Amino acid sequence: MSEREVKKEIFIIGHARSGTTILCDILNSDRNVFLLKEGEIYWRTELPHFPDFFNRKGAFQNRTWLKGHYLPPCIPPSLRGDQVLTELAKFYPRVGDKIALGPRRPEQLGLWEHFAKNYFHADYVFTIRHPLQAIVSMHRMFPANAYGDLIDTWLEAVSLMIRFMSFLPNVYVIPMERYSDRVLERLNGFLGTEAVVAGASLRAAASNGLDALPGLSKEDEDRIERCGQIYRDLYDSWDESSLRFYYHRNFYDYFEYYTREISAVMSPVQSQSVNAYPPVRTFINDPRRAVLAAYGECPLPLPEWQEIAEDYVKAFPEDGYGHYILALMLMKQASHQESALRHFEEALNAGYDSFWVKYNRAHAYINIGDYKQAVSDLKDAVSLNNDHKEAKSFLSYAETLI
């Protein structure tokens, strides 16, 4: 059997706002391809009831019933995350996932190890975008994150791309600025797919200047400029015929140079996290944490999920996020309000986001009839985030109960 006849997975990876969704939609137009849209199975391998979670999350986010947004009924809803692609491959010759890297996502540290171990011969398509345009767009998507977080996200994605290209055999790259029908047809040839690309060329994106990033510090401005130089060098050496880079120097010298440049620009803590082996603070990659995040995205009342959350909190009592999610689970049960309040308090003590703790803890206080404390929490929440309309509305309602 030739390499082309082997059924290989396809994974699209890029930083947020780099065109991963557009590329996923194009490849999913091939009837033999099924790529999940941010299933993030790389860290949800042990998530129970993954298809049920994924489909409910799609409905929760009001996504249209299209391939990639939902799994079809032929996939049993009770499967774990690591079983989904294998089951899906019984119906679609080419399966995979689309991954958009975001700011302050520590679970992304496990991405390289997961794919290098489990999908060495898969096809990978990396997307990248000019850092300034990417950071402007990411700032609109993640307004609560500092510019430094967004810069690190861009650098992390490029560092990961270089690592994949250095080690793995089937890695392609497409700068977002070079998306065109011709380039996407070229990708079809490499992947052996028949995706519909007619009319898929992107309109020229608006070119933003630094003034599109209000409050940008001189340090972050300098970092963006250095990222821009890295991107320009890579962009100039990108080869449309191979969808890779033309190596002006020795292969290892080429990648080593850019790896050092990226490390020099990345913030010290993030650089340590990305390049250390084994990763620092390994508990953040504990598979049970994926259950907490899944509940945060789509609160399924599954006893199995609650048991896992309880075990996680016992193992990592210093993680405020664990206490927060467990409190949300307990709050949904009438007889567990006091336990929910205790875990909300533990979340605060561990330094978890005060706004979200107090906004949601107010619900628990209302459930037990302590309206004054609910109002107190909501006043604190509104003072922490005066733009949150739901918090203001909830405060007005709670005040009528006193």
Image (spheres, rainbow, N blue to C red):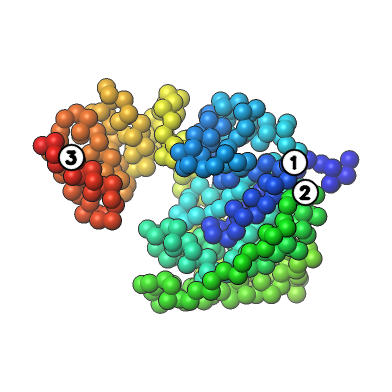
Instruction: Say which residue label 1 marks.
Output: 32
Query: What amino acid is found at the position of numbered circle 3 in the picture?
Result: Ala
Relative vertical location of residue 310 with respect to residue 391 in this rendering, above or below: above
Residue 196 is situated, as x and y percent measured from the top left of the image, at 73, 52
Assign a secondary structure to mark 1. Answer: loop
Label 3 environment density (alpha carbons within 10 Å; few <14, some 14–19, many ≥20): many
Q: Please tell me how crowded label 1 is: few (under 14), some (14-19), or many (20+) other residues with Cα within 10 Å.
A: some
Q: CA distance from mark 3 to mark 2?
A: 56 Å
Q: Nearer the viewer, residue 260 or 320?
A: 320
Where residue 69 appears, as percent x and y from the top left, is 57, 41
Upstream in sequence: badge 3 or badge 1: 1
Q: Earlier in the sequence, mark 1 or mark 2?
A: 1
User: In the image, what residue type sits under mark 1?
Assistant: Asn
* Amino acid tagged 2: Thr
Residue pointed to by mark 2: 193
Q: Position of residue 42 (x, y in %)?
A: 59, 42
Question: Seen in the image, is 270 located left or right of residue 67?
Answer: left
Residue at the extreme front:
199
Q: Earlier in the sequence, mark 3 or mark 2?
A: 2
Considering the image in quadrants, where does the C terminus appear? Answer: top left
Question: What kind of element bears circle 3?
Answer: helix
Residue at 21 percent of width and 54 percent of height: 383
Classify mark 2: helix, strand or loop.
loop
Gap in angstroms between the C-alphas marked 1 and 2: 8 Å
Residue name at image x 38 percent, y 29 percent: 310
Q: Is residue 144 left or right of residue 117?
A: left
- Dot 3 corresponds to which residue? 398
